[in-house]
Image (tube, grey):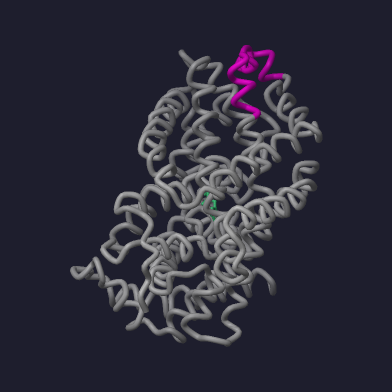
Amino acid sequence: MQNNRGNFSKIGFIMAAAGSAVGLGNLWRFPYAVGENGGGVFVLIYLISVVVIALPVLMAEVTLGRFTGKNPVGAFNAIKPGSPWKFVGYLGVASGLMILSFYAVIAGGAVGYFFKALTGQFKGMASESAIASNAATEAYQSFAGNGVLQIFLLAIFIILTVYVVSKGVSGGIEKYSKILMPALIGILFLLLFRSLTLEGASKGVAFYIKPDWSALKPSVIINAMGQAFFSLSLGMGTMITYGSYVSKKENIPSATKWIAVFDTGIAIMAGFIIFPAIFSLGMQDVSGPGTMFNVLPVLFDKMPGGMVFGPLFFLLLSIAALTSTISILEVPVAFCIDEKKWDRKKASIIVGAIALAIGVPCALSESFLGVWSTIWGGLSLSIGALFVAIFIGFSWKTPNALKEMYQGADNFKGAKVWSFAIKYIAPVFILAILLSSFLL
Ligand code: PFF
């Protein structure tokens, strides 16, 4: 099959895919998921899931996308025309809408916190009395509880996303990512240093890296695996869609490996920032979706130059979120363009408007948002990834996928390992984990 869409430049694909992968999933969702799922044991299972399940699925999705040159529905249809496989694509399109709806609420929160930081509202958050009275947490609760403001910020973020996506897969994302990503990482290192040098930081580090096996439950495993998919933008066809814009010269195994290393590294770093701070400062009530917003203002207030780094961090976080929402919206939009023959602008606006409407309940209730994030951000992605693995392994078949993968990667050494992982390890594990969480 010939795919002439190749719209990404060589570095462009890595940038765009890393931009999709790195976002709120790393800095907002990962730390709170660790907190809710028993600490180190979750981290360990997450890491194993990335290596043995998510990375093979990432390679599979990009390869499927590049081979077919299509959105997820079109991609399954191109290989098995008229078969029910296309429903996996539909599930992806639906997940995209649902994920965008809650993701953009948190992204709106990052924008809101950028303005809070800019106007000096983190000042005093690290004073003893402020910590004792949970001032940062209370400030976040009143921020998150302001429904009108939340909906306003959600709308702003959706409009921004629609604007970029309506312009197409352009050089814009690539150009900015090259400067913004390193800047974000720079600030993360500063935060890391601040957090790890706090007195008593080691208690947080221990919670984070020492697996407490008594915390192990099927729900911990399923959440860790779901987080691996979420963080790498898998299971809903984002990487199939982005793969459709990749040129035949791109080395898929090597590019995807770097994306996984980069993405996972940033998530792990986020944990080393958040947990030492929580434990060492003795913060209370910092769990759930608000975790990041409760902890970072205190840390910025405790840090030299926090007045500058605080706003800069939330600005960069907003942009990292934007490169992710762009990739999420791109899935339903590419579907409407390819399959429904809508033009890009119309598709972006209509899909964006639907996501905005679905996002309103998430903007109004944090607990609803948490549930939405678990169902659509975890469960549905695991189901999607399961079907991708079965499809590639047994329907399209690995030798065909490998033929595509070898283009641009004729020195790829991991063909056997990848085939085994996608045919057996990924489906068996995902299925077992899904079933155990329903049955146990
Ligand atoms: N990977 C993104 C993050 O970690 O923030 C979120 C995401 C993007 C999830 C694209 C799913 C997706 F298809």
Query: Along the horizontal axis of the image, is 296 left or right of 391?
Result: right
Q: Residue at x 36, y 81 (%)?
A: 398
Please tell me whether residue 76 belongs to the stretch shown in magenta: no
Q: Is residue 415 visible?
A: yes
Query: Along the horizontal axis of the image, is 205 left or right of 92?
Result: left
Compare residues 104 and 352 and report the one nearer the observer: 352
| As drawn, 84 above or below 318 | below
Compare residues 321 and 298 and report the one nearer the observer: 321
Compare residues 410 and 123 and report the one nearer the observer: 410
Please tell me whether residue 121 belongs to the stretch shown in magenta: yes
In the rendered image, residue 325, in percent from the top left (x then y), is placed at 57, 48
Compare residues 128 and 102 and report the one nearer the observer: 102
Q: Residue at x 45, y 23 (%)?
A: 194
Q: Is residue 39 visible?
A: no
In the rendered image, residue 353, in percent from the top left (x then y), is placed at 72, 50
In the rendered image, residue 245, in percent from the top left (x then y), is placed at 41, 61
Query: Along the horizontal axis of the image, is 144 left or right of 65?
Result: right
Q: Which residues lie in the magenta part?
A: 112-132
Q: Residue at x 57, y 56 (%)?
A: 344
| As drawn, 316 above or below 307 | below
Q: How many marks?
A: 0
